[in-house]
Image: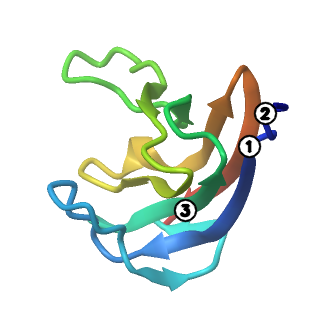
Amino acid sequence: MVKRKPEVRIRSYGIYEKWNRDTKELPRFVQATYRVRAEVDVEFGFVVNIKGAKNCELEYCIFHPGILDENGTLRPPFDGSVYVKHNDWDFYLGDTIWEPIADKLGDWRMTLTLSGKIVADKTFTLYQ
């Protein structure tokens, strides 16, 4: 039997309500936009729907504009992986703004990779 190619579709992108990482619920969508006013606790990102990829590894990466650690050293992009939980699965990739705001300004590129191929790619511009 031939295995179907996974389908990935971006359902929404932009600003969301604050996400509670301790629940299975995705954050509530607020506004579609690529430009985000940089204010503390603003949540932004995108939700994808993935079909036909149960148990496949989904890699995510958030390239930020130059966030510094407590020693003033540039932090690497935020990355990791999760396994697709169902054959029809929604996944949220996003971030929020925290103090200091100055090193959060600029372009934030968010990517999802499945089987070595980028399947979702959005760039958000944070401004004051």
- For label 1, count other residues whose C-alpha is less than 10 Å away and answer few (under 14), some (14-19) or many (20+): some
Q: Amino acid at mark 1?
A: Pro
N-terminal-most mark, 3 or 2: 2
Q: Is residue 42 above or below residue 117?
A: below
Q: Is residue 31 above or below residue 64?
A: below
Q: Which residue is mark 1?
A: 6
Q: Amino acid at mark 3?
A: Val
Q: CA distance from mark 3 to mark 2?
A: 25 Å
**Horizontal and vertical percent position of residue 105:** 50, 50
Instruction: Please identify, in this view, whether the residue under mark 3 or under mark 1 is nearer the observer.
Output: 1
Secondary structure of residue under mark 2: loop
Q: Residue at x 42, y 44 (%)?
A: 85
Quadrant where the image shows the N terminus: top right
Residue 3 badge: 2
**Horizontal and vertical percent position of residue 56:** 55, 29
Q: Which residue is mark 3?
A: 47
Asked where in the image residue 65 lies, by quadrant, the reply is top right
Secondary structure of residue under mark 1: loop
- For label 3, count other residues whose C-alpha is less than 10 Å away and answer few (under 14), some (14-19) or many (20+): many
Q: CA distance from mark 3 to mark 1?
A: 16 Å
Farthest right residue? 2
Q: CA distance from mark 1 to mark 2?
A: 9 Å
N-terminal-most mark, 3 or 1: 1
Q: Residue at x 61, y 60 (%)?
A: 49
**Disc 3 and disc 1 in contact, CB within 8 angstroms:** no
Q: Is residue 97 above or below residue 26?
A: above
Q: Residue at x 42, y 74 (%)?
A: 16
